[in-house]
Image: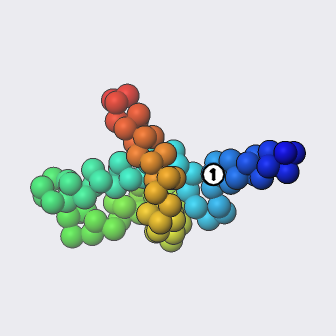
């Protein structure tokens, strides 16, 4: 019985831990929201003229402000995409953030 408890405890801890090089759920959720807004603004041609032809500049500004970069963001995207139970946490964070505004 103690062995079962130990295994369950370790499994639960692994669900909560974010691997190194992967953005935590809250930070990844914030990045997704802001980058989605940029993408929508670009599609509607609502970005400032200097960013219309260089949307990556705007994206880089957002990621830098969130203390990350495109490499870490892309790794995080792949990680959460392949871990649906963790992506649910990200989506819940996004919903909570959007409801606050």
Q: Is the C terminus in the top left, top right, bottom left or bottom right quadrant?
A: top left
Q: Looking at the picture, tell me which residue is in the foreground, 30 or 1.
A: 1
Q: Is residue 99 above or below residue 2?
A: above
| Viewer-side residue, 43 vs 29 | 29
Residue sitting at x 34%, y 55%: 35
Residue at image position (87%, 45%) is: 2
Label 1 sits on residue = 15
Q: How crowded is mark 1: few (under 14 residues within 10 Å), some or many (20 or more)?
A: few
Tell me where residue 95 appears, x and y as whole percent.
Answer: 37, 38
Q: Position of residue 38 (x, y in %)?
A: 27, 55
Residue pictured at 63% horizontal, 51% vertical: 15
Identity of the residue furthest to the right in this view? 2
Name the secondary structure under disc 1.
helix
Residue 71 placement (x, y as % from top left): 50, 71
Task: Quadrant for residue 57, please give it.
Answer: bottom left
Q: Where is residue 99 in the image (x, y as percent from the top left)?
A: 34, 30
**Can you name the residue that lies furthest to the left here?**
44
| Quadrant containing the N terminus in the rendered view | top right
Colouring convention used in this rendered image of the protein: rainbow
Using residue 52 as the reference point, say whether residue 31 is left or right of it.
right
Residue 70 shows up from this direction: no
- Tell whether 39 sits left or right of 86: left
Vertical placement of 57 versus 17: above or below? below
| Direction from residue 52 to residue 95 in the image, left or right | right
Q: How many labels does the image show?
A: 1
- Report the residue that reaches farthest toward the front: 1
Evaluate whether residue 82 shows in this view: yes
Q: Which residue is drawn at 55% across and 56% down?
A: 23
């Amino acid at each position: 019985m103690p062995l079962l408890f130990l295994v369950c405890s370790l499994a639960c801890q692994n669900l909560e831990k974010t691997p190194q090089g992967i953005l935590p759920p809250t930070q990844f959720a914030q990045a997704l929201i802001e980058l989605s807004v940029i993408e929508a603004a670009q599609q509607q041609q609502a970005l400032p003229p200097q960013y219309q032809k260089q949307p990556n500049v705007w994206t880089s500004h957002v990621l830098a402000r969130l203390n990350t970069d495109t490499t870490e963001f892309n790794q995080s995207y792949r990680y959460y995409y392949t871990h649906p139970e963790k992506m649910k946490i990200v989506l819940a964070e996004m919903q909570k953030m959007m409801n606050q505004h």
